[in-house]
Amino acid sequence: MILYIIATIENDDDRMFMEQLYLGYRRLLYQEIFKIVQNEWETEDILQSVILKLIEKIPLLKTMAEAHLINYCVIAGRNTAFNHLRDKKIELPLTEEWYHEEANTQTSPVELYLLKKEEFIYFQNTWEVLDVQTRYLLESRFFLKKSYKEIAENLDMNEAAIRMAVTRAKRKVNRAILSTMGDR
């Protein structure tokens, strides 16, 4: 189905670019989306949506270096999957990868990695007791990577109020983590 969508692109260069992009990154995008939705049929549907979104961005994509292009495509896949779950009102799975993507044993000293891992465990325990509004704000801002403006539009609020609400939500989580760490 996706190749049919790509075949409808009128500009030959754009069509060839998207075919190469699709064939080169299909497996990676599929895996990233599947990690989030855990359903093969939904993964295929979301992958089609991602490709349609990427087709709209062809002029931008063509200007990117390969490393940036890969990241852009993966983030588009993740965001579309997160939006899909949110629209279906399905709880977003909480994983360490989304909390601290930079916590990588290959690039971080072992001690730093262990500290981040321990911090994540406290964060995960705290996450479960947060109120719905706090979780929504943090999910939107940090997991879905939405701008303050987008969140404000979704909630029909002004951007400054959202900035303050996100700051308060982060403080609430930090206080909860610190109190949990003090209990050990």
Image: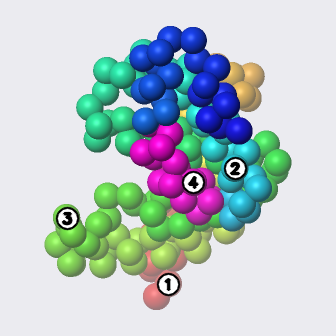
Figure check: 16 above or below 88: above
Q: Nearer the viewer, residue 17 or 128?
A: 17
The residue under label 4 is 30
Question: What is the CA distance from the residue labelled 4 to the residue labelled 1?
Answer: 41 Å
Q: Is residue 105 left or right of residue 12?
A: left
Provide the secondary structure element on which disc 1 rests: loop
- Which amino acid type is marked by label 2? Glu
Q: Amino acid at mark 3?
A: Thr
Can you give x and y, in whole percent of width and height, for residue 134 in the image?
65, 49
Point out which mark residue 107 bears: 3
Viewed as shown, does residue 70 lie left or right of 159?
A: left
The residue indicated by pointer 2 is 44
Q: State the image coordinates of residue 132 (x, y, percent, origin top left).
A: 74, 52
**Lateral position of residue 51 relative to residue 58, left or right:** right
Is residue 44 visible from the viewing direction of this image? yes
Q: Nearer the viewer, residue 157 or 153?
A: 153
Is residue 177 visible in the rendered image? The answer is: no
Earlier residue among tags 3 and 2: 2
Q: Judge whether residue 23 is colored magenta.
A: yes
Q: CA distance from mark 4 to mark 2?
A: 7 Å
Q: Earlier in the sequence, mark 4 or mark 2?
A: 4
Is residue 180 a member of the stretch shown in magenta? Answer: no
Indicate the position of residue 120 as horizontal and vertical percent values. Answer: 45, 70
How far, Cα to Cα, is label 4 from label 3? 26 Å
**Residue 56 placement: quadrant:** top right
Instruction: Return the disc, 4 or 1, that comes first in the chain's sequence.
Output: 4
Circles 4 and 2: CB atoms closer than 8 Å: yes
**Residue depicted at 53% across the width and 67% down the height:** 95
Residue at 21% across, 69% down? 106
The residue at the point 64 percent across, 20 percent down is: 8
- Residues shaded magenta: 21-36
